[in-house]
Amino acid sequence: MIGILLIAAFLIFLIFGYPAILAKRKKKEESPNSPHFDAQMKKLWNIAQDSMKERKPLRAEKALLTILKFDEKNAAAYNRLGILYAKEQKFDEAIECFEIAQSLDDNPSSLHNAGLIYLETGAYEKAEMAFKQALELEGGVPARFIALAKAEEKLGKRKEAIDALESAYELEASTTTLRQILALYEASGDEEGIEDTTLRINNQLAALERKKKTAKKVPRRSLRRVPRQVKPMKPGSKAPSHIAKSPTHRLTRPKTINK
C-alpha cells in the first residue's frame, strides 16, 4: 500500500512539479544577470560578427534577431542589424534599425549611419540633419565632416560644404580633402579659391616628398670598437695567458730623455 502511494506521489511530481522546476530553471538561465545568459549572448555576437565577415547575411541576421528577442533594448544589435540591411540595400529596414538604436542610446555612430542611408536614397535634408547631430555628439571625426559636406553639396550649399571640408582638414591634413575643396571651387568658378587651394596642394605634396627623402637618409652606425677594460693585476700575480701573448699588452720601458 505504501509502495503504491509512493509511486502515485512520484507520478504526480512528474506531471505537475517537474515541468515547473524546469521552467523555473530555464527562466533563471535566461535572466540577463545569469552567467549562462552572458555566455549565450557572447556566442551569438561571435556568430553574427563572423557571419558578416564571411558574407553570410542570413546567418548574421538570425543571430542578431535572436539577441534582440532576449534583449529588446540592445542598441548595438540594432545598429549592427542596420549595417547588415544597408549592405543588402534594404534601406527602409536599415533606417528603422538605426532610428531604434538612436532612441535607445544617444550614439553618434547610429546617427552617422542613418545619414549615409539618407544620402544614398536622396533624402539630403535628413542626411544633413543626421550628420550635424552626430557632430554635436562627437565632433573630432573627419569622416563626419566629409559626409556632411557631401549632403550640403547636394543641397547646393557650396560654401557650407567647403567649411565642413576645412574642418575635416584641420583634424586630418589630407591632400584628398584639399582636392575635394578644389573641386567645389572649380564647380563654382571661384578663381581665387582655385589658385589658393592648388598652391596648398602643391606645398603639401612638396613637404611630403621632402619628408620621404629625409627618411631615406639613415646615418651609418660607427664601426669603431670599444676597447675592453682590463682589470689591474695584483702585485706578484702572473698576467693571464691572453694578455701575455698579446703584443699590445707587453710592458715597455720608458725611453730616456736626452738632456
Image (cartoon, rainbow, N blue to C red):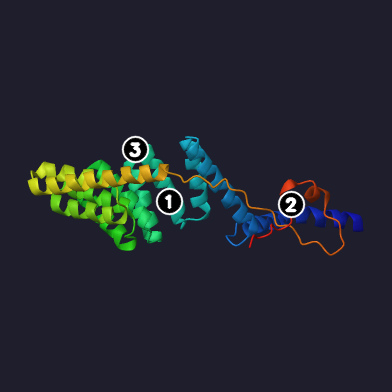
Q: Which mark is residue 89?
A: 3
Point out the frontmost of discs 2 and 1. 2
The quadrant in which the N terminus is found is bottom right
The residue closer to the viewer here, 103 or 176, is: 176
Residue 123 seen in the figure: no
- Do the residues bearing badges 3 and 1 touch, measured as CB atoms within 8 Å? no
Q: Is residue 236 left or right of residue 219?
A: right
Q: Earlier in the sequence, mark 2 or mark 3?
A: 3
In the image, is residue 114 above or below residue 237? above
Question: For the residue marked with disc 2, what is the amino acid?
Answer: His
Q: In the rendering, at what x and y percent does residue 205 appear?
A: 27, 43
Q: CA distance from mark 2 to mark 1?
A: 80 Å
For marks 2 and 1, the one nearer the N-term is 1
Q: Position of residue 94 (x, y in %)?
A: 36, 45
Tag 2 and tag 1, C-beta contact below 8 Å: no
At numbered mark 1, what does the secondary structure look like: helix, strand or loop? helix
Quadrant of res 100 = bottom left
- Quick one: 224 or 3, which is closer to the camera? 224
The residue shown at (43%, 51%) is: 78
The residue that label 2 is drawn on is 249
* Label disc, if present, on residue 78 of the rendered structure: 1
Q: Residue furthest top?
A: 55
Element type at mark 3 = loop
User: Label 1 amino acid?
Assistant: Tyr
